[in-house]
Image (cartoon, rainbow, N blue to C red):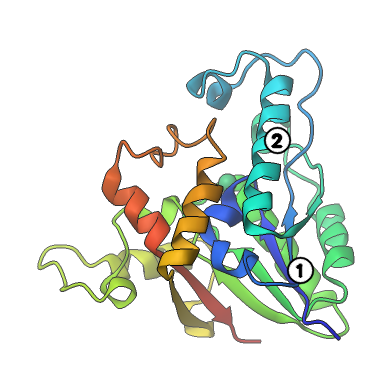
């Protein structure tokens, strides 16, 4: 039987930005949680205005098309759960329902990839926690990987253990990253580091897939205006294998 992997993305773009190497492997399905259509007549939100969207619904259609384009580049299947993202909701997501829905998708998974929640975005944390709850309820536990959320994980660049760079005498990125994991509710002692250094061909594919999310990249500082950040985003991906 084929080895089945599912990569959970909070928003359209998160998994491609953060776990593209896994998405490129055969037998991988991208599962995006917050893909729902904004309610009719809703005024543009803060993020809509920042990214110059005049109509939230039209922007969502644009983002879905961008995501299709990115998936086409990486060659993975997709499942969309059509939940409303935070900017279009009036309250928290129904965690129990979300977890049940993710559980249905994960039912026959051999491996699942989940956002670590670095940066603390409400939707990333909600998706992560619902997925972890879903995994606990499965009759057979799949392998669980938590991936570093790009671009939030790149606030201080990658730590030395990712890039092999010489330590900065005045900046310990590892301390920050470890602190982030704990602060966001994870236990670093249960997490085994994994570094994916993207070889040139994978990197070129990722670059092409990421470029598809054109409406989001400037606001995420991934449009090339911050060359170091973009280079970091394309060169490495980081995840942690979660011990049961
Ligand atoms: Zn996101």
**What residue is shown at x 58% (from left), y 51% (from top)?**
14
Pointer 2 local density, CA inside 10 Å: few below 14, some 14–19, many at least 20: some
Mark 2 or mark 1: whose residue is earlier in sequence: 2
Number of on-image labels: 2
Q: Residue 206 appears at what percent x and percent y?
A: 51, 56
Q: For residue 236, which numbered disc appears in the image?
A: none
* Position of 61 relative to 232 (above/below): above
Q: Residue 45 appears at what percent x and percent y?
A: 60, 21
Marks 2 and 1, how far apart at CA: 30 Å
Q: Residue furthest front?
A: 201
Front residue of this view, candidates 150 and 207: 207
Pointer 1: what residue? 133
* Horizontal arrangement in the rendering, residue 28 relative to residue 186 (left or right): right
Quadrant of the image occupied by residue 242: bottom right
> The N terminus appears in which quarter of the rendering?
bottom right
**What residue is shown at x 79% (from left), y 36% (from top)?**
36
Nearer to us of marks 2 and 1 is 2
Q: Residue 77 appears at what percent x and percent y?
A: 77, 58
Q: Residue furthest left?
A: 169
Q: Residue 138 appears at what percent x and percent y?
A: 85, 78
Front residue of this view, candidates 190 and 80: 80
Pointer 1 local density, CA inside 10 Å: few below 14, some 14–19, many at least 20: some
* Position of 184 relative to 163 (above/below): above
> The C terminus appears in which quarter of the rendering?
bottom right
Q: For residue 65, which numbered disc appears in the image?
A: 2
């Amino acid at each position: 039987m084929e080895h089945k992997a599912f990569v959970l993305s909070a928003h359209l773009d998160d998994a491609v930005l953060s776990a593209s190497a896994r998405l490129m492997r055969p037998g991988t399905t991208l599962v995006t949680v917050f893909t729902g259509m904004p309610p009719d007549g809703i005024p543009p939100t803060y993020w809509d205005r920042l990214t110059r969207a005049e109509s939230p619904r039209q922007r969502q259609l644009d983002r879905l098309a961008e995501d299709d384009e990115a998936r086409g580049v990486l060659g993975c299947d997709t499942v969309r759960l059509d939940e409303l993202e935070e900017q279009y909701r009036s309250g928290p997501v129904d965690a129990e329902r979300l977890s049940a829905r993710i559980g249905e998708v994960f039912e026959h998974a051999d491996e699942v990839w989940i956002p670590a929640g670095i940066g603390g975005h409400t939707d990333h944390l909600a998706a992560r926690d619902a997925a972890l709850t879903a995994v606990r309820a499965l009759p057979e536990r799949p392998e669980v990987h938590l991936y570093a959320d790009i671009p939030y994980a790149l606030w201080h660049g990658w730590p030395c253990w990712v890039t092999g760079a010489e330590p900065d005498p005045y900046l310990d990125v590892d301390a920050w990253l470890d602190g982030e994991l704990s602060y966001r509710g994870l236990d670093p002692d249960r997490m085994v580091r994994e570094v994916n250094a993207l070889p040139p061909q994978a990197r070129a594919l990722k670059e092409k897939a990421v470029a598809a999310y054109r409406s989001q990249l400037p606001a995420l500082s991934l449009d090339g205006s911050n060359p170091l950040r973009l280079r970091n985003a394309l060169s490495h991906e980081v995840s942690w294998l979660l011990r049961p």
